Amino acid sequence: MSFDAFLQDWFGYTIYFIAYIAALGAFGCSSIFWLRVLTIFSSACFVVYYYIIPADPLWLDIFSEGALVVINAAMIALLWYREKSIRFSEEEKELYATIFSRFSPFEFYKLIKVGKWQTFEPEDVLTKQGKKVPALYFIYNGEVNVVVDGKTIVQLRDGYFVGEMSFTLEQAANADVIVSVPTRILYWPQDILQDLLKRNPAMKNAVEAMITQDLAKKLRQG
Ligand SMILES: Nc1ncnc2c1ncn2[C@@H]1O[C@@H]2COP(=O)(O)O[C@H]2[C@H]1O
């Protein structure tokens, strides 16, 4: 075997291996953006392989891999365009920069779209002990009392979720939660949020991670 042929074989195996690993990586990605990026990279490597390595270029394979590159690049461009045209309110921007930073802008937009902002007044009841919880609440600004068997056990302020336990366990509320000062809240009706998360596994992971963090903060608070 000539040195040139050896080099060509070596290059062929290497590029095929890289393309294959990138394709496996793409299948393992939960983020749609990285799935598309890796698919583009993998397919582009296959295009090079099918063009250079066989005695004659394999046009059918080059065309099908090339089509994957074009479609995924177009979808990334569409995603980028959608994200660029999204407008958030000042409150939403602040939330995105802090608590909700795990989400892509478009995922956060979908979450915000099904959520509702409301200012609750003192004595408003968010959850009732032993009763189904209607929504998952996020305290943007204000304060609520968590009351078990008539006794306030803890107060929750900005940055805490309320109703996350029943949302996660699909059980009734383990406490009354009563607003104590005018409180700005972002909330999601439970069934609508469950539906959205069923259709978006990456968002489901991000919400679960936020709830885990919230529960850890509550445990620390005692
Ligand atoms: N010990 C606690 N510390 C902080 N928050 C609590 C505590 N117990 C209950 N809660 C909150 O009160 C909510 C009542 O409804 P959930 O059980 O769905 O979710 C509960 C929590 O959000």
Image (cartoon, grey):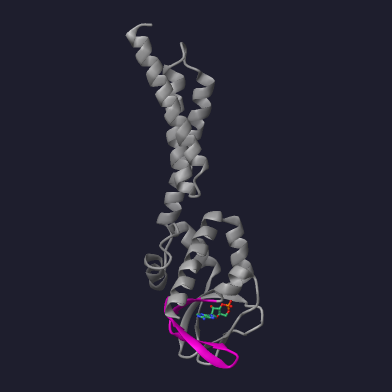
Q: List the single residue furthest toward the top.
A: 1
Image quadrant in which the N terminus is located: top left
On the image, the x and y values in percent for residue 114 come to 55, 67
On the image, the x and y values in percent for residue 71 come to 50, 38
Picture layout, residue 160 above or below residue 19: below
In the displayed structure, does residue 21 sit left or right of residue 124? Answer: left
On the image, the x and y values in percent for residue 36 come to 47, 42
Q: Quadrant of ligand 1?
A: bottom right
What residue lies at 46% left-to-right and 14% top-to-bottom?
54
Picture layout, residue 13 above or below residue 137: above
Which segment is the magenta one? 138-162
Q: Is residue 11 visible?
A: yes
Picture layout, residue 119 above or below residue 64: below
> Residue 161 or 188: which is nearer the viewer?
161
Is residue 142 found inside the magenta-colored segment of the image? yes
Q: List the single residue furthest toward the left.
A: 3
Picture layout, residue 9 above or below residue 182: above
Could you tell me what secondary structure mostly forms the magenta stretch? strand
Is residue 26 found inside the magenta-colored segment of the image? no
